[in-house]
Image (cartoon, helix red, strand yellow):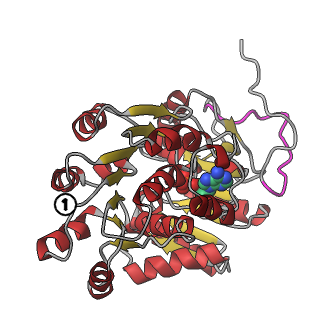
Amino acid sequence: MPFTKLGLSKPLLEGVQAMGYGEPTPVQLRAIPPALEGRDVIASAQTGTGKTAAFALPALQRLGHHGKLRCLVLEPTRELAMQVETSMRDLARFTDLKVSSVFGGVGYGKQRSALRDGIDVLVATPGRLEDHLQQGTLKLDQIEVLVLDEVDRMLDVGFLQPMKRIIAKCPKDRQTLFFSATLPPEIAQLAAWALRDPIRIEIGASRSVTSTVKHGVYVTDQGGKYGLLLALLEATEYDSVLIFSRTKHGADRIAKRLRASNHSVAVLHANRSQNQRIEALEGFKSGRYGVMVATDIAARGIDVAGVSHVINYDIPQHPEDYVHRIGRTGRAQRSGDAFTLVAHDELKKLAAIERFIGQKIDRLHLEGKNVPKQGDDAAPRAPKPEPRLDGRPSRPRRRPFRR
Ligand code: AMP
C-alpha cells in the first residue's frame, strides 16, 4: 500500500516524498491509520523499522497548523532526541509546524528562547525537561499527543520515575503513542497505566535479527581480540564501521590503538561532553571518520544511513542488546554485516544470545587470527572458507554433522 492511501495530508505526503521514502514500512502501515483516528498505540518494533515516522506523521497531522506546544516526544538519550527532532522537522518541512528539542549537556539559553518563540512539538529527554518544568519555562497542560519512545531503554537508564512524573503532568484526555523494542512485565504495567484502550502492534519478533543483516561470530582468546579486530578492519572493505565496547574506558582504549594504526576514529560514550558527542556523530555521518567506537547506551537508536559493518568487540551483556546493536546496520532494507568477537569465556553468553534470537549464529574464521580451542563450539576446522575481503564466507558454511 502506498503512503497516499494512509490518509495523510498533502504537506506531510510531500514531506515523506522529500525524505525519499517509497512505501510505508510495516510499523508505519499498522500504526499510522489507528493513530490518525486518535487511538492510543503500543508498538514493539525493532530499531530501524521506521518507527519515528510511524509516530511523527500522525502526530504532525493532528496538530495541523502552528499554534502552541501540543506534542511531547520523550527520548532516553540526547542523541536520539536530536535525531528524532531532525526527522520530525524534515517530515514537517511543508507545514508551518515548529519542532524543537531540550536535552542535557548544553546551555539553557537557546532552549529557553525556542520555547518562548512558540513551538508545536517538543522532543525531550526527561531530566532536562523536568528542569524546564521546575523553572517554569514550559507547561504540559496543553499536550494532545504524548509519544514515549524507546521505553525499555528509558527504564534501563533509570528514567522510570521521571517519566511517570512527566506523564502525570500531561492532560488525561491526550493521545499516547508508546514504542518499546521489548515489552517485559514492568513495561506492560507502565503501558496499562499510561494508555487508554490501545491498539497493539508487534512488528516481527523483537527477538529477531533484521533479515538484511548477515551476522557471524569469531571465537578467539580475549588477548587476541585487538589483533583480530585490526585484521578484520584491514580485510574488510567498509564504508563505515560501528564498534561496540562494553565500557567507556574500553572504547577509549580501542579508539586510541586504532588511531595509532591510521584509522580515522570517532568515540561516543556518556563521559564525553555534548560537543564531543555531536562532533563524533556528525563526523561519522559525514564520512570524516570511517570508524566509530561506542558504548551501548550512547549508540542506542542512532541512525546513521549506510553503516556497512557493526563489530561487537565485547559480546553484549544482555541478549536483547545483540539485536539492538546489530540493528545499526541493515537499516531500512539496506544490507549490512555484523561480527561479534567472542572470547572463550564468553561462550555462555553467546549461547544465551542464540537461545534468545532462536537461531545459531555462523562461526567465522580469519586465517591465523582466531583459533578456536578444541571442544569449543567454534568454527569447523575443515573445509575452511577462504575469507573474502568483506569478511563474508565464500562458500556456504555448515556445521559439521555430529554423531
Ligand atoms: P527509525 O526506525 O525510525 O529510526 O528509521 C530507520 C531509518 O529508516 C531512517 O533512516 C528512516 O529515515 C528510514 N525510513 C523510515 N521510513 C522509511 C520508509 N517508509 N522507506 C524508507 N526508509 C524509511
Q: Residue 352, position in %: x, y?
A: 48, 32
**Would residue 338 be visible to someone looking at this image?**
no
User: Residue at image x 12%, y 71%?
Assistant: 134
Q: Residue 378, position in %: x, y?
A: 65, 35
Residue 255 is left or right of residue 138, and the answer is: right
Residue 298 is left or right of residue 161, and the answer is: right
Task: Name the residue type under label 1.
Answer: Asp
Res. 211 image quadrant: top right
Point out the image quarter for the C terminus: top right
Q: Is residue 161 above or below residue 100?
A: above
* SS category of the residue bearing label 1: loop
User: Residue at image x 58%, y 40%?
Assistant: 29
Q: Is residue 248 magenta?
A: no
Residue 328 is left or right of residue 211, and the answer is: left
Q: Nearer the viewer, residue 316 or 126?
A: 126
**Would residue 391 be visible to someone looking at this image?**
yes
Point out the image quarter for the N terminus: top right
The chief SS type of the magenta part is loop
Res. 140 image quadrant: bottom left
Give the number of callouts: 1
Where are the magenta residues, as a range? 377-390
Judging by the rendered image, the residue that carries numbered circle 1 is 141
Which quadrant of the picture is home to ligand 1? bottom right
Q: Residue 206, position in %: x, y?
A: 50, 36
Q: Is residue 387 above or below residue 188?
A: below
Q: Is residue 387 magenta?
A: yes
